[in-house]
Image (spheres, rainbow, N blue to C red):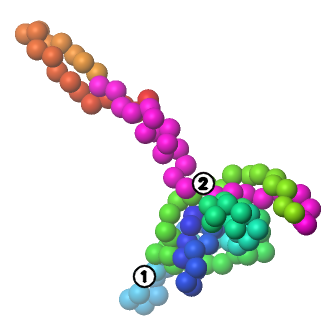
C-alpha cells in the first residue's frame, strides 16, 4: 500500500486490518510493515520514478489509520547495482499492477441471434 505518514508518502505491506470501538468512537486500523525510504541515488538518477526500497519486516511494524491509505501498489523484487553499496535484494514500486493488461485485453461482446433474426448484444467478460 502507498500510505501518507505524516507529510510524506511511504510504502507499506499490510499485515491485517482491525476495527476498534471505544465508547462511542469507532476506528479502522491496519497493522503495516514499512519499507525503507527509496534509495536516493536511484531516485535521483531516474528523475524520481524508480522507488527502490528495502523490506524491513517486523522491525518497522506500526498501526495506521486506514484513512491514510492512498493506493494499492505492488513491490517487485530486484537486485540493483548501486555505486558504493553491496548488491542486495530490494523492491521497486509498481503502481496499478495489472491495469495495463486489462486495458490491452479490452472486453468482448457476445452476439446472439433471436428467433426473429434480430441481433442482440450482451456484455461479455474481460479476457
Q: In this view, does 26 lie to the left or right of 75?
A: left
Residue placed most toward the observer, 116 or 81: 81
Q: Where is residue 106 in the image (x, y as percent from the top left)?
A: 39, 33
What stretch of residues is rendered in magenta? 84-109
Characterize the local packing of mark 1: few (<14), some (14-19) or many (20 or more) Cα atoms within 10 angstroms: few
- Name which residue lies at 63% across and 66% down: 48
- Name which residue lies at 69% across and 66% down: 43
Q: Is residue 113 positioned above or below 71 on the image?
A: above
Residue 57 appears in the picture as rendered: no
Q: Position of residue 4 (x, y in %)?
A: 54, 76
Q: Answer yes or no: do the residues labelled 2 and 1 have beta carbons within 8 Å?
A: no
The residue wearing badge 1 is 26
The residue wearing badge 2 is 94
41 is within the stretch colored magenta: no
Q: Which secondary structure lies at badge 1?
A: strand
Q: Where is residue 125 in the image (x, y as percent from the top left)?
A: 36, 31
Q: In this view, does 83 lie to the left or right of 11?
A: right
Q: Is residue 71 positioned above or below 62 on the image?
A: above
Q: Which of marks 2 and 1 is nearer the N terminus?
A: 1
Q: Is residue 13 positioned above or below 102 on the image?
A: below
- Name which residue lies at 78% across and 75% down: 59
Q: Is residue 24 positioned above or below 79 on the image?
A: below
Amino acid at each position: 500500500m502507498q500510505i501518507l505518514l505524516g507529510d510524506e508518502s511511504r510504502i507499506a505491506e499490510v499485515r491485517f486490518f482491525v476495527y476498534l470501538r471505544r465508547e462511542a468512537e469507532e476506528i479502522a486500523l491496519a497493522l503495516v510493515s514499512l519499507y525503507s525510504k527509496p534509495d536516493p541515488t536511484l531516485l535521483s538518477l531516474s528523475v524520481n520514478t524508480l522507488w527502490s526500497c528495502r523490506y524491513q519486516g517486523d522491525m518497522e511494524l506500526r498501526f495506521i489509520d486506514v484513512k491514510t491509505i492512498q493506493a494499492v501498489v505492488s513491490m517487485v523484487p530486484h537486485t540493483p547495482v548501486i555505486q558504493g553499496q553491496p548488491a542486495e535484494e530490494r523492491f521497486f514500486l509498481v503502481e496499478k499492477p495489472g491495469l495495463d493488461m486489462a486495458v490491452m485485453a479490452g472486453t468482448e461482446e457476445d452476439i446472439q441471434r433471436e428467433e426473429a433474426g434480430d441481433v442482440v448484444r450482451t456484455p461479455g467478460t474481460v479476457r
